[in-house]
Image: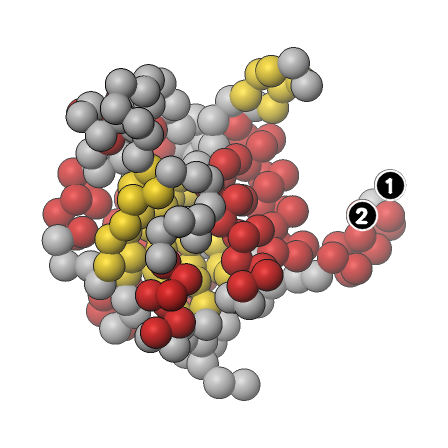
């Protein structure tokens, strides 16, 4: 099997998730941010193009408004973003909707995207699902993203449970999920990250009951 032609996609590593209305709760935000920066450094050293996206809402919106301080990238990411291959803004959960990212990736022969950033229970799962019909292989680094607590009329989901559940769901079909350390080893060896599949995941689920 040929080595993956990867791009590292950093999704919305913005102040909103640290100082705004959507603080990341799990994994610990500072730890996940460290892993994002680590993945960016590994990608740069390996010659993997790094792409940085930022969510942008309309002016005056409570979150991600372009004139707000919380729209800005975290400083640890901002200093690295000066040297990345591509940057874009987005207005939907998916990194592909209206951004031109698909075309940018295809022009460079990228077949695998590695997703890091925020948040697990919105843009990460939305982007991984959107990549499936486009034919991109997806890797998600579980310790380089994060979730928030959610309560609404349909129920509730603490961040830890949401994050762990979504990682299991992604690994069963839409993505290969790995830690940043395991991904670094795969990058170094030129291998793909091993994912799972829905049929075997379901069989294990039945056996565990």
Q: Is residue 1 above or below residue 178?
A: below
Whether residue 149 appears in this view of the structure is yes
Q: CA distance from mark 1 to mark 2?
A: 7 Å
Residue drawn 20% across and 59% down?
84
Q: Is residue 167 or residue 71 the one in the foreground?
A: 71
Question: Few, some or many C-alpha atoms within 10 Å of disc 2 (few <14, some 14-19, many ≥20)?
Answer: few
In the image, residue 133 sits, relative to residue 65, either above or below, namely below
Q: Residue drawn 50% across and 36% down?
A: 122
Residue 61, image x and y in percent?
32, 20
Q: How many marks?
A: 2
Coloring scheme used? secondary structure
Classify the position of the N terminus by image quarter. Answer: bottom right
Please tell me the numbered disc located at residue 205. 2
Closer to the camera, 71 or 198? 71
Q: SS of the residue at dot 1?
A: loop
Q: Quadrant of residue 3?
A: bottom left
Q: In the image, residue 92 lies at what x, y percent?
A: 43, 39
Q: Which residue is pictured at 22% across the width and 30% down the height?
A: 66
Q: Residues within 10 Å of mark 1 (few under 14, many from 20)?
A: few
The answer to the question of whether label 1 and label 2 lie on touching residues, with beta carbons closer than 8 A, is: yes
Estimate the x, y position of residue 172 in percent, counting from the top left. Answer: 67, 55
Residue 116, compared with residue 75, is above or below; it is below
Instruction: Tell me if 201 is positioned left or right of 174 in this view.
Output: right
Give the structural element (helix, strand or loop) at label 2.
helix
> In x, y percent, where is residue 51?
29, 57
Q: With 94 as the anchor, is 87 left or right in this view?
A: left
Residue identifier under label 1 = 209
**Is residue 33 in view from this perspective?**
no
User: Residue at 58% across / 16% down in the picture?
Assistant: 151
Q: Quadrant of residue 209?
A: top right
């Amino acid at each position: 099997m040929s080595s993956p032609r990867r791009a590292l996609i950093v999704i919305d590593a913005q102040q909103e998730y640290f100082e705004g209305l959507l603080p990341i709760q799990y994994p610990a935000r500072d730890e996940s941010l460290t892993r994002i920066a680590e993945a960016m450094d590994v990608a740069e050293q390996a010659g993997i193009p790094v792409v940085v996206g930022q969510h942008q809402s309309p002016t005056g919106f409570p979150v991600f408004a372009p004139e707000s301080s919380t729209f800005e990238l975290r400083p640890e990411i901002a200093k690295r973003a000066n040297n990345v291959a591509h940057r874009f803004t987005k207005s939907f959960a998916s990194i592909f909707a209206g951004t031109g990212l698909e075309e940018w990736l295809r022009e460079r022969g990228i077949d695998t995207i590695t997703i890091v950033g925020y948040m697990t229970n919105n843009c990460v799962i939305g982007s991984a699902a959107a990549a499936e019909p486009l034919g991109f292989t997806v890797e998600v680094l579980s310790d380089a993203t994060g979730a928030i607590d959610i309560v609404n009329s349909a129920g509730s989901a603490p961040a830890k449970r949401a994050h762990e559940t979504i990682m299991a769901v992604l690994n069963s079909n839409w993505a290969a999920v790995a830690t940043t350390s395991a991904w670094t080893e795969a990058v170094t060896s030129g291998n793909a990250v091993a994912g799972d599949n829905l049929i075997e995941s379901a069989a294990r689920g039945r056996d565990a009951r």
